[in-house]
Image (spheres, rainbow, N blue to C red):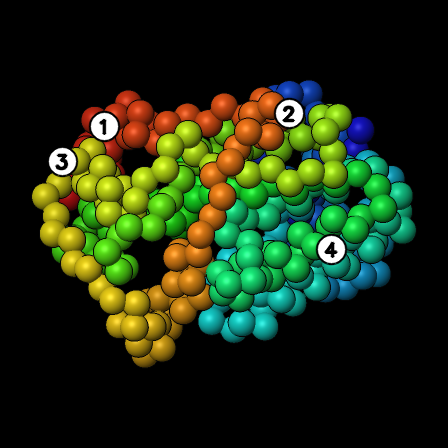
Amino acid sequence: MKILITGASGGIGKILIKKLIKANFDDLAVLSRGKFKFRETEKIKIKIGNLNNFDSLDKALKNIDVIIHLAGITHTNKTKRYFKINADGTKNLLQAAEKNFVKKFIFVSSRAASEVGGAYAYSKLLAEQMVKKYKFSWIILKPAEVYGAKNDEAVQKLINKIKKSYFIPVPRKGEFELSPVFVDDVVAVIINSIQTLKNNTSYILAGANSFSYKNLVNLIARACNKKIKIIYVPIFILKIIAFVFPRLLVSDQIPRLLVKKSDDISLAREYLNFNPRNFKEWVKNLKWVLILVICAP
């Protein structure tokens, strides 16, 4: 079975490749626009291609059995880029996959995908709608806030902010829910989805427990043994900050954070052996590591 991965240089992608090789999936290819951080080996081949260039995708997908589509843009102030990469790019990849008779298309989307969650969320929803029309087998995975993958992810950014600051801004009253999911749990599901018989299905990948944003901030602060003061910030103030200081806050992050999201992981539990760890326990188990490493001055 030959598997091609897009977005393989990202936090999830790097871990996924290591886990795939460990699980004896040793016929892998990665899509790259140019120089790739992984060295090409007998087990990992580099395919040159661009999501916005159909001909390059057509060449890259020759003899591919499964596509794992991780690539996408998550933060930009150029709204059109969300649709160019996340929606149009996925459309091109799907069309090239159909032309090359790729048996399965696994799309890693977002739990925030919706019409009302901002441009990123809407671009992901449009991509999901196209995936559902794929002629062969497809699977859509919708992870919540992934942690443990890399330093620029939302949860790690929050940890870093708590480490450095005593005053922590919280949107509105911090009542909206987050369900952090560990990267290894997401990767395990991606691997299980390759051979599952329950195809043509969307799966929610939320953490074992949900937390209000306020409670999550306090939980991390206690793990860091850090005293903080929460400052509640009205949404209109955040919008002004995003407009005046676009590098500080991407305006699209606000509706994405506030949009209501499903936490029903029953299908993923039943068919993909999804057993997410509890973020609270993760923090508890790593408490001393967090104090010594993350919270070090």
Quarter holding residue 29:
top right
Q: Nearer the viewer, mark 3 or mark 4?
A: 4
The tag on residue 271 is 2
Pick whichever, 182 or 34, lies toward us.
182
The alpha-carbon separation of the residues under discs 2 and 3 comes to: 39 Å
Q: Report the mark closest to the observer, 1 or 2.
A: 2
Seen from this angle, which residue lies furthest bottom?
244
Circle 2 packing at 10 Å, graded few (<14), some (14-19), many (20+), is: some
Question: Could you tell which of marks 4 and 2 lies nearer the N-terminus?
Answer: 4
Helix, strand or loop under label 3: loop
Query: Which circle marks residue 225 in the picture?
Result: 3
User: Where's residue 120, x and y in %?
Assistant: 53, 61
Q: For the residue labelled by badge 1, is the local secondary structure a helix, a strand or a loop?
A: helix
Who comes first in sequence, dot 1 or dot 4?
4
- Residue type (three-letter) at the residue carrying disc 4: Met
Q: Mark 1 belongs to which amino acid?
A: Lys
Q: Residue at x 74, y 34 (%)?
A: 199
> Which quarter of the rendering shows the C terminus?
top left
Amino acid carrying label 3: it is Asn
Percent x, y for residue 252? 44, 66
Question: Circle 1 is placed at which residue position?
Answer: 287
Q: Are marks 4 and 2 in contact (CB under 8 Å)?
A: no
Measuring from the top left, give residue 239's x and y in whole percent: 33, 72
Compared to 76, does 94 lie above or below? above
Foreground disc of the pair 2, 3: 2
Sooner in the amino-acid sequence: mark 3 or mark 1:
3
- Determine the image quadrant of residue 87: bottom right
Between the residue at mark 3 and the residue at mark 1, the CA separation in whole angstroms equals 9 Å
How far separated are the C-alphas under marks 4 and 2? 23 Å
Q: Which residue is mark 4?
A: 130
Q: Is residue 141 visible?
A: yes
Disc 1 versus disc 4: distance between alpha carbons? Answer: 43 Å
